[in-house]
Image (tube, helix red, strand yellow):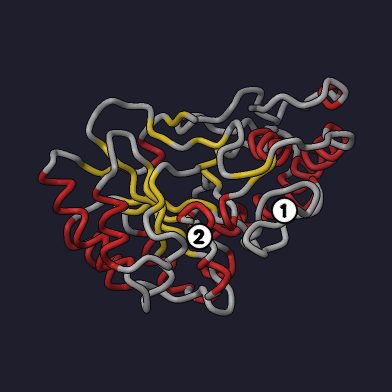
Amino acid sequence: MSAMLALAGCQVEQHAVEVETAVASTPVPALLPTAEPTANTTPVSSPTASPVLAFATVEQTLLARYASASPTKWGERVPGVQTRLQTKNKVIALTFDACGGKDGSGYDEKLIQYLIQEQIPATLFINARWMAANPSTFQSLAANPLFEIENHGTEHRPLSVTGKPAYGIAGTKSVKEVIHEMNDNADQIEKLTGKRPLFFRSGTAFYDEIAVAVAHDLGFAIAGYSVLGDAGATYNTEQVYNAISKATSGSIVLAHMNHPEKDTAEGVIKAIPVLQQAGFHFVQLASMELND
C-alpha cells in the first residue's frame, strides 16, 4: 500500500533508454548532450544561437526524433530513473518535494528551520505553482547553501507521452508537453536563482521510458527515490520515523515540505538523530554520482 500512496498527497491535498530503431534516425544537433547527464555534467549549448532559437531547434529535433516512439514501460522504476547514491559510505540524501496547487502550496517551516538549526543539507524539488505562491520563501531557500534547488515540474504531472495517469492525475500527453513540463519550470528557477536545475522529479514520480529519454536529451537527470519517507505527506509521525530511520548507505529519501499540517516534520526530527548516532551524514544530490 505504501507504494500506492507515494506522492499522491501532493495532489489530493492538493537511458538514454532503448527506443525503437526508427526513432534514432533523426540527427542530433550539437547543442544536445550525447550522454546521460550526471551530477557533474552540464548540457552543451550553442555559442552562437540565441537561447530562444536554440531551444526551438532542440524542441523540433526531439519532436521529430520521438514522433514514432511508443512507450512500453510505466512507473517509478523505469530505466534511467536514478534511485540511489553511488557510494558505500554512510551518506544519505534527504529530498523534499514542494508540489504546489490549491491544497499543496503550504510551507513546513518547522521542518526547514530544524534542518537549518542542525545544519542538515537537503535537496528541494520545487514546483512552479509553489514558487508562485511562496516567492519570498523560495528566494530565502535558494539563497541558503544548505539547500539545493531542483525541478518538480511546471504543472506537477506524471511524465508521459500518452497522457497516462498516476493516482488520478493526468500525465503529459505528448513529447511537446513533456518538454514544457520540465523546461518551463527549469527556466523559471534559473531566472530566479541564476542556476539551472540539474535534476527533475515529476509529479507522482511516474514516467514512461520515452519521457525519460527526452529528459536526458534536455540535460536533466531523473531523480527517483529508494526510501518513501512520508507517502505523499500521508504518514503519521511514527510511520515517517520508521521509514526514514531504516535508510541505508546511499539512500535517497523522498518526503514533502509543503504540508505543515501533517506529521512529516515530527517524523524527520525524530529520525535524523538516530541516523546520526549510527554514523550517517547527509548530502545534496548534486554532490554525488547516482545510479539506478
Instruction: Identify residue for label 1.
Output: 180
Disc marking residue 249: none
- Compared with 158, 21 (above or below) is above
Direction from residue 107 to residue 170 in the image, left or right: right
Judge by depth and name the residue closer to the eye, 138 or 209: 209
Residue at the image point whose x is 14% and y is 53% from the top: 273
Q: Residue 118: name its quadrant.
A: bottom left
Direction from residue 104 to residue 245 in the image, left or right: left
Direction from residue 248 to residue 55 in the image, left or right: right
Judge by depth and name the residue closer to the eye, 194 or 211: 211
- Compared with 210, 227 (above or below) is below
- Compared with 113, 125 (above or below) is above
Identify which amino acid the numbered label 2 is placed on. Answer: Leu
Secondary structure found at label 1: helix
- Of labels 2 and 1, earlier in sequence is 2
Residue 132: x %, y % from top left: 56, 73
Residue 184: x %, y % from top left: 67, 56
Disc 1 packing (10 Å; few <14; some 14–19; many ≥20): some
Q: Are marks 2 and 1 in contact (CB under 8 Å)?
A: no
- Compared with 125, 51 (above or below) is above
Residue at the image point whose x is 32% and y is 27% from the top: 87
Identify which amino acid the numbered label 1 is placed on. Answer: His
Judge by depth and name the residue closer to the eye, 280 or 3: 3
Secondary structure found at label 2: helix
Judge by depth and name the residue closer to the eye, 3 or 226: 3
Instruction: Identify residue for label 2.
Output: 5
Disc 2 packing (10 Å; few <14; some 14–19; many ≥20): some
Residue at the image point whose x is 41% and y is 35% from the top: 84
Residue at the image point whose x is 70% and y is 41% from the top: 211
Q: Distance between the residues labelled 2 and 1?
A: 26 Å
Residue 223: x %, y % from top left: 50, 42
